Image: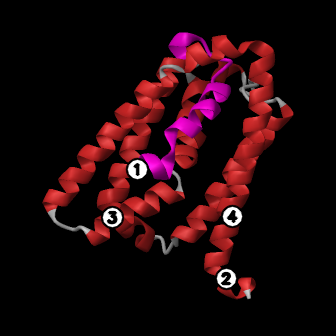
């Protein structure tokens, strides 16, 4: 799971997407993100195949949608507009309104619990279908969520070490990398849906 999701690689993205928040706000975002990742993967483990079949959605269509969302976030990072307050007056008065909006989407999904992680979890559930296996998978998912929480708690230290200029540079670099990941996700999804395009 660590190899598929690579939370160490996502850490710079998390730091740059929350660099406009206070320490308390960042910790709150971290808590929601890590908890959401655990919930998403647990739901995928037990109900993933049922949900996709219910809505007649293929994992490749989900991969394309996630790629488009990632690209839109990457564009705001490259342009330096990430974290700008675009809320109306009522939303500005709501506690943690902006944090919650980025904690679940796009941080928890699709950046962390994206199509790759969800599809892998569904495949694991299909290959190993005993309750003993599923209990083990559930325990692994909970441990992974705790790992993400502990890892992202180190975010403030990284922000302070980078400084404003360093943070801006890393933001744009990570934006380019994130855009590349989004494009790769779309290309893989299209290739799987239309295999004739590769010939």
Question: If you read the primary sequence from the N terminus, does the residue marked by circle 1 or circle 4 appear first?
Answer: 1
Q: Is residue 66 above or below residue 53?
A: above
Q: Is residue 142 above or below residue 182?
A: above
Question: If you read the primary sequence from the N terminus, does the residue marked by circle 3 or circle 4 appear first?
Answer: 3
Q: Residue at x 52, y 68 (%)?
A: 59
Q: Is 77 positioned to the left or the right of 57 in the image?
A: right
Give the Cα distance between marks 1 and 4: 21 Å
Secondary structure at badge 1 equals: loop
Closest to the camera, between mark 2 and mark 3, is: 3
Secondary structure at badge 3 equals: helix
Question: If you read the primary sequence from the N terminus, does the residue marked by circle 1 or circle 2 appear first?
Answer: 1
Percent position (x, y) of residue 20? Answer: 68, 18
Q: Is residue 199 above or below residue 151?
A: below
Percent position (x, y) of residue 30? Answer: 48, 26
Percent position (x, y) of residue 76? Answer: 79, 37
Residue 105 numbered mark, or none: none
Which residue was labeled with disc 2? 194
Q: Is 99 positioned to the left or the right of 167 in the image?
A: left
Rendering colour mode:
secondary structure
Q: Quadrant of the C terminus?
A: bottom right
Give the Cα distance between marks 1 and 2: 28 Å
Q: Is 185 positioned to the left or the right of 79 in the image?
A: left
Q: Main secondary structure of the magenta part?
A: helix
Q: What range of the chain is rendered magenta? A: 1-25
Q: Residues within 10 Å of mark 1 (few under 14, many from 20)?
A: few
Residue 186 numbered mark, or none: 4
Q: Which of the 4 quarters of the picture holds residue 37?
A: top left
Give the Cα distance between marks 2 and 3: 25 Å
Residue 1 numbered mark, or none: 1
Residue 124 numbered mark, or none: 3
Secondary structure at badge 2 equals: loop
């Amino acid at each position: 799971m660590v190899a598929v999701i690579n939370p160490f690689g996502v850490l710079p993205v998390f730091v740059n997407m929350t660099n406009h928040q206070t320490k308390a706000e960042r910790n709150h975002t971290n808590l929601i993100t890590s908890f959401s990742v655990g919930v998403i993967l647990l739901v995928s483990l037990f109900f993933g195949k049922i949900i996709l079949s219910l809505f007649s959605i293929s994992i490749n269509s989900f991969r394309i949608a996630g790629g488009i969302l990632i690209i839109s976030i990457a564009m705001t990072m490259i342009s330096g507009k990430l974290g700008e307050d675009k809320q109306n007056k009522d939303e500005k008065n709501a506690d943690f309104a902006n944090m919650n909006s980025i904690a679940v989407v796009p941080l928890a999904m699709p950046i962390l619990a994206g199509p790759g992680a969800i599809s892998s979890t569904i495949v694991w559930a299909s290959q190993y279908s005993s309750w003993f296996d599923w209990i083990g998978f559930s325990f692994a998912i909970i441990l992974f969520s705790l790992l993400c929480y502990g890892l992202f708690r180190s975010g403030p230290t990284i922000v302070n070490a980078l400084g404003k200029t360093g943070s801006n540079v890393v933001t744009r670099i990570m934006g380019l990398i994130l855009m590349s990941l989004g494009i790769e996700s779309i290309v893989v999804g299209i290739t799987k849906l239309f295999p004739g395009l590769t010939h």
